[in-house]
Amino acid sequence: MNILGNNIETNNLILCQIESNKTCYTIVRKQSYKTVGTVSFSTVESNKVCEFSSFQFKIDILKQDTKHDVTLLEYCLNIIEGLITNAFNILDIESVVIECADLSTNIIDCFINKGFPKKKSKIVVARSKWVPSSDEFVSIALFDILGFSNLIENHGNDIGLKLYRNLVKIIKTKENIGVPIPVPINNEWTSFAYVTGYYGNVHISYFSDTFIIWTDYIERGFASWLASGFNYQFPLLLKEPNTLYYPIFYKNHGIYLSFLEVCMDFFCQSIVNGIPLRGCVASGLAKMDNLSSVFVGKTLIEAARGESEQNSIGIAYGKSFNNHHPVLNEYFIPYSKHKKNPNLTESFLSPMAVDYPRHWRKNYADQDFPHLLQQMNTDPKFTHYYDNSRNFFEFSAKHENWYQEINRDGINNILDYYKKTEEWYNSVTT
């Protein structure tokens, strides 16, 4: 159902349809081709056959400037005013549900003051994310604050809220969305080009000392190609035999890499702010309902169990890494000393860890990581967590090009690959 029709333009902005999805559009600036927002809508079926009871409409604005947000929102509302009118006339619509993601009160007021068609209209306004109706493929990162009770005693109850606000800022600001992401330009994944704006729907939830970040692969931003590119020698395209994997993960792989950039930046900023985190990244099916705060699925369990299996501050990969992992080696590194029990057979962790120290060296070189760790190390029972994190940081710096040292003979799948990386790991740590 393509009610909006073709792309719509104004003097400065274009409303562009996202590929073949007729219910999702991006708001793009004409001159820079940067995405500044998204528009999506859907109908919700009633109990009557071939009828609809409500019309759901969502706007995400990616700017922080409230005044500018309202201008963009008014532009969207002007476009959809006719859309909603047609919906009331063409379909058997009883209500319109407006869903706003992380928007200010002024923007909500803009909805109310705009004035929608009064014919049978029932306007419902909510600050919420788009809610999936069933399990969908997602990538999840679950973070937990180490020694949370001590932090509350030392810094007060607002420590979690401060970190949450930092996370919202990382996700929403133009600076992060503009991070160049490598995407393949050939079927062998040996040639890459950089793009900006290649991100998916990033969602967040926060309760007590736990933060959940997740992304879906349904839609992405309006990516802009950069002039630079590079050839790549050792893309990791291996999977586990006789197991399922989801092709959309590799089709929209740039979304996953953008998601990892958000997770690593969130972790690094938490260290700068004196907040120790343990996290785990997992990919697979889950039901992530932000509106009703329902989060269930094996993927979420994997991330939660993997987070608690670590005796180090940092970010691990869950076992789903076997089939859903970064193709580029710079996003992971073989490591096992962050595990509480490296010999645990039913581990929820991968033999690979997120190489956040590489991200730190690239983006936080002016910050002294060991010194920041030492400042947080105030409880003797957690000292080994900080020591292990410092050791991992040094290991990453020492073995920055580890993937060029692997013996690749006889590798047919990801399990063979793990054996070869374990051989390398043992050779440099013993």
Image (cartoon, rainbow, N blue to C red):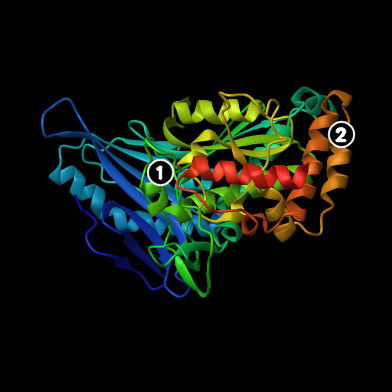
Q: Is residue 424 above or below residue 95?
A: below
> What number is the disc on residue 377?
2
Residue projecting furthest to the left: 49
For image coordinates 30% across by 46% down, the residue present is 41
Mark 2 and mark 1 lie on one chain; the one further toward the N terminus is: 1
Q: Considering the numbered disc 1 on the image, is that residue within a helix, a strand or a loop? A: helix
Classify the position of the C terminus by image quarter.
Answer: top right
Q: Quadrant of residue 397?
A: bottom right
Task: Indicate the position of residue 59 as horizontal and vertical percent values.
Answer: 41, 49
Q: Amino acid at mark 2?
A: Asn
Residue 265 lies left or right of residue 365; in this view the side is left
Using the image as rendered, state which of residue 270 and residue 84 is in the foreground: 270
| Neighbours of disc 1 within 10 Å: few (<14), some (14-19), many (20+) | few
Using the image as rendered, state which of residue 297 and residue 343 is in the foreground: 343
Q: Amino acid at mark 1?
A: Ile
For image coordinates 50% across by 29% down, the residue present is 300
> What number is the disc on residue 322?
none
| Neighbours of disc 2 within 10 Å: few (<14), some (14-19), many (20+) | some
Q: Which residue is mark 1?
A: 112
Residue 143 lies left or right of residue 322; in this view the side is right
